[in-house]
Structures are given as C-alpha cells and as structure tokens.
Image (tube, helix red, strand yellow):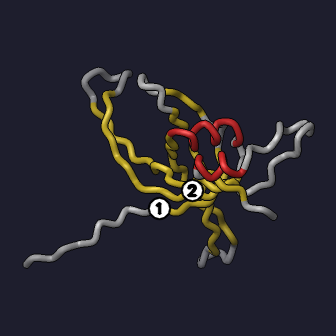
Amino acid sequence: MNVRLPEQNQVLLTGNLTKDPEVRYTQKGTAMCRFRMGVNRRYKDTATGEWKDDTTFVNIVVWREAAESCGKRLKKGSPVHVEGRLRSYEYEDKNAPGAKRSMLEVEARRVQILEKSSPAGSPAGGAEEPAAAEAAADIEEVPF
C-alpha cells in the first residue's frame, strides 16, 4: 500500500507566560528567546458537577528579530497567542553524565501579544516600536 501523508506540523496555543522570557545569542549572533507558557482548559467534572481547570505547560522558542521583541515586550503573566511547529531534540543530562534526554517544544513562527502596550512614560514601559519593525519581527499586538 502506497499512502502519501501530507506533511503537517502546526501548533496554535493561547496562554500566559509562567516566568520572564530569556534571550540568548548563538555563536553566530542569532537571537533566541525561550519562554514557558501555561495553557488552560476548563471543564466540568461529570461526577461532582464542579468546574475544574487543567493547565498544560509548554516550552516555546522564538528566533531572530522576533526573539529580541519577545524579550523586550513580554514578562511573566503576559497573555500571548503562539503559532508554530513542534520540534524535538536530544541532549545529555548534566546531572547524569552519559544519560540522554529528549525535549519537545514549540518553535514559534508567530507570537501575538494579547494585551495593550503601555504608553510612553508610563511606569510599565517605554515607547511602542514602529509598525514596520513589528511586522518584520512577526510579533503582533491585538488592538482592543
């Protein structure tokens, strides 16, 4: 049987950062930002009738200009919508030499900030970035 499956690896998540993002640079100077977000699911327990929350924690990695923008504009608790793809990799555990571990994360293609920016001069932050830079970094802000 010769079945051709379409290549599909797309992830859409909406949630809040669990801590401040970390920006690092590769040896070649490429910006990389990592953050962890919590994604909630609310459901009704059929046995008790109570509403309950189930939270899934997901690691996110963002690259290049978008990584720098995320590092500047996001903080713990920031609500975001992330579009990207699942990526897995292996690494050696520093605490157990020779032990290999595997990791699954979302490589973000687009990060949409779901809160308004603070105006210039306010206690929470500086001036907004120009729209052209925002589009180039593939970071969006939802105006509401």
Query: Looking at the picture, does residue 69 appear above or below residue 51?
Result: above
Instruction: Mark 2 and mark 1 in contact? Answer it, CB < 8 Å.
Output: yes
Q: Quadrant of the N terminus?
A: bottom left
* Secondary structure category for the residue under label 2: strand
Residue at 15% in and 76% down: 3
Q: Position of residue 143 (x, y in %)?
A: 78, 62
| Image quarter in which the C terminus is found | bottom right
Mark 2 surroundings within 10 Å by alpha-carbon count, few (fewer than 14), some (14 through 19), many (20 or more): many
As drawn, the label of residue 11 is 1
What secondary structure is marked by label 1? strand
- Say which of 131 and 21 sits in front: 131
Residue 117 position, x and y percent, is: 80, 49
* Residue occupying the far left of the picture: 1
| x, y percent for residue 65 | 57, 40
Q: Residue 46 vs residue 79: left or right?
A: left
- Please report the residue visible at 35 percent of the width from the left and 27 percent of the height from the top: 93
Picture coordinates of residue 29 (x, y %)?
A: 47, 26
Furthest residue to the front? Answer: 132
Mark 1, other Cα within 10 Å: few <14 / some 14–19 / many ≥20: some
Mark closer to the chain start, 2 or 1: 1
Tell me: residue 40, above or below residue 133. Answer: below
Residue 82 is tagged as: 2
Q: Looking at this view, is 103 or 21 the one in front?
A: 21
Could you say which is closer to the camera, residue 76 or residue 132? Answer: 132
Name the amino acid, label 2: Val
Cα separation between marks 2 and 1: 8 Å
- Image quadrant assignment for residue 92: top left
Camera-nearest residue between 142 and 136 = 136
Looking at the image, residue 140 lies above or below residue 62: below
Q: Determine the residue positioned at 50% across, 27% down.
A: 25
